Amino acid sequence: MTDRTRLAWAGGDAQLVLGVGGEQPVSLLSLRPATADGAPELDEAAAPPLVELQALGHGRFPGSHRYADSTVGARLRYVRHEESADEAGAELRVVQEDEAAGLVVTSVFRATAGVPAVRTWTEVAVTGGARVRLQAVSSVVTGAFLADSGRGVGELDVVCADSDWVAESRWRRTPLRETGLVDIDPEIHHHASRSRFAVTSRSSWSTGERLPTGAVVAADDSWALAWQIEHNGAWHWELGERRKGAYLALLGPTDAEHQWSTVVTAERGFTTVPVSLAVAAGGVDDAFAALTLQRRALRAGRSRELPVIFNDYMNTLMGNPTTARLLPLIDAAAEAGAEYFCIDAGWYDEDGRWWDSVGEWRPSATRFPGGLGEVVDHIRSRGMVPGLWLEPEVVGVRSPMAERLPDEAFFQRHGERVMEHGRYHLDLRHPAARAHVDAIVDGLIAEFGVGFFKFDYNIMPGPGTDLGGLTPGEGLLAHNRAHLDWLDELLERHPGVLIENCASGAMRMDYAMLSRLHLQSTSDQQNPLLYPPIAAAAPASVLPEQAGNWAYTQPEMTVEESAFTLATGILGRLYLSGYLNRMAPGQLALVRHAVTVHKELRAEIAAAVPFWPLGLTGTDGTWVAMGLRSPEPSGGSLLTLWRRPGAPGELTVPVAHLRGVDVTPEVIFPGPGTGAADWTLAWDAEQGELRLTSPDSGPAATARVIRLR
């Protein structure tokens, strides 16, 4: 094809326009929701190549740290495209070729009906006898947010988040010009800026430092593009300015950041990690609402069960279970309405030094004199499904399995096993490692009827494994993919088993994992006063119905303090803990009330999208707020409001999507007769504001769950 043309494709509720043909690479010019008004002015000269590909011997021009201006990306030329559709959705495949390097590059887009988003990735193959070492391949590159928003770089903000153990999901909003995208007047210099705003996650905690989720938002909240990188390992995304226009690049592991490279030949191609792009004619809330719909689409065909789970760990047994301690907890959890009971860490421990001895995963004889089966049977007799904590990817240095398994079954560097925090890391590419973890999980299901696993993951193995002559990052990526294959096979063998995704709380909170697994621990935070900002921000990264927010009320708490921690779980997945067995009848009744309210809301939560009336990027105040609303215009809304120490007793809560609507506000938790103080609620329809008063004479910490009917 010699002439430049436009390729329009409507997949689901997303509309793409690609520039194809001529002496230019394919570009993603526009990505808009089907409901968007008008049409953007598209500028081919401002659009970056759809794929940026760094290969040894080819490099960039000009040189920089950026994933832009690659010589291969600039040389790619359109060959053809194919469209198809099936029950899962629509697909577009766009094929390009770089004759100089002998590379064939295919960009794949998938979309689902009713969802203003696409999932996309890049496939790389070679022609003839070419042998090319790739150093970085983008899953997608686009500058469409400029044309679609009708805004320049100086009128756009980036929304992104830092994350850390017990300090997860700390979102911030920053003008692009303040992130390092400095206006240098590129025309007078005849080159683009070499600056970038780069966000990178290393090793196997995909959310251990940064979140693979973000958004570019018009400063006036009139347009937004949101994204997520769906990978359980290392990744990178960046924003940069071109000589004309700007770009967003989303990638998995790279050479410069992650010690990753790989060779492609006629027999061996390469596929990048998938990413999703979601669009909205609105602001932050609208962008993450669109991404929420995309996450549900990714989970199509997976279990939609949402049971209430009691876990004995957090602020309770803390890894020290015994028969004597568990039996009364089981009874109390059943009385409170829990449907699953998970025995957390320590059930395999004989000597109190279990951290570096794990790996066999056999029940302790000293902790359970009558056998673990006695406890599991009691769970089942109380009408609950038994669950166990497991950390399948590691073997402690003192474990017998460290000697029984071959060296090749573990991560290695330079011929030595990688050891981190007293553990070796299994390499799930190796059949002995796969057989080991299969035997453990299948055996526990067969012997004890386990219906739930909390899969934890508490170490990082560094850049990866170089076993077999691979680069460390290449070995890590191969293991990451083998891990996902293992989970798929496990769930196929045991379709009724539910699995929690945990990694020291939320250190691997990505949609490679969560498209498969059922529940996400949102934090290990043990201070209930510090949990609300984490719980409130979680739905920007994870579906509300997957957001396992701990509710660990204790007998020494007042009614208001108990309501505070229980409310943290109600509009997500209520994840119960606490010494319920030591509670007075009235205290346990409050827990049962929270569970009942949550159960009544489960279907509504699983269809809702999140919003943040006090702002996603301002959740760390004395007042914290998070809401869920129906995506249907006629649907209702739910709010959780936490009042933390030092907060004023009065608050005005803007609810923009209900402006002009007659609303009746109602506290649904804690309800009447619980001993909780009354809150005064008033709705201003003209302003779209909820005005509330909580008694100043009350305790320092309190919370309410409110329905706006």
Image (tube, helix red, strand yellow):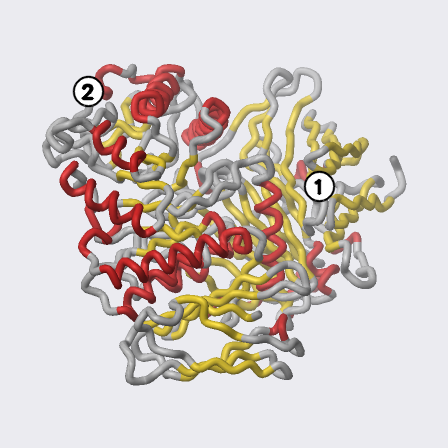
Q: Up-down: is 108 above or below 295?
A: above
The image position of residue 685, as x and y in percent, is 62, 81
CA neighbours of label 1 inside 10 A, class few (<14), some (14 to 19), many (20+)? many
547 or 223: nearer the viewer: 547
Residue positioned 73% across, 52% down in the render:
31
Residue 62 shows in this picture: no
96 or 159: nearer the viewer: 159
Residue positioned 60% across, 75% down in the render:
663
CA neighbours of label 2 inside 10 A, class few (<14), some (14 to 19), many (20+)? some
Q: Circle 1 sits in a helix, a strand or a loop, which is it?
A: helix
- Judging by the rendered image, the residue that carries numbered circle 1 is 74
* Left/right of residue 190 with respect to residue 370 in the rendered view: right
* Left/right of residue 399 with respect to residue 84 in the rendered view: left
* Viewer-nearest of discs 2 and 1: 2
* Left/right of residue 434 with respect to residue 51 in the rendered view: left
- Judging by the rendered image, the residue that carries numbered circle 2 is 400
Q: Circle 2 sits in a helix, a strand or a loop, which is it?
A: loop
The circle on residue 348 is none
* Left/right of residue 60 with respect to residue 98 in the rendered view: left
The image position of residue 61, as x and y in percent, is 63, 44
Q: From mark 2 to mark 1, how far is it between C-alphas?
A: 54 Å
Disc 1 residue type? Ala
Residue 663 shows in this picture: yes
Q: Quarter-wise, where is residue 384 in the image?
A: top left
Contact, CB < 8 Å: mark 2 with mark 1?
no
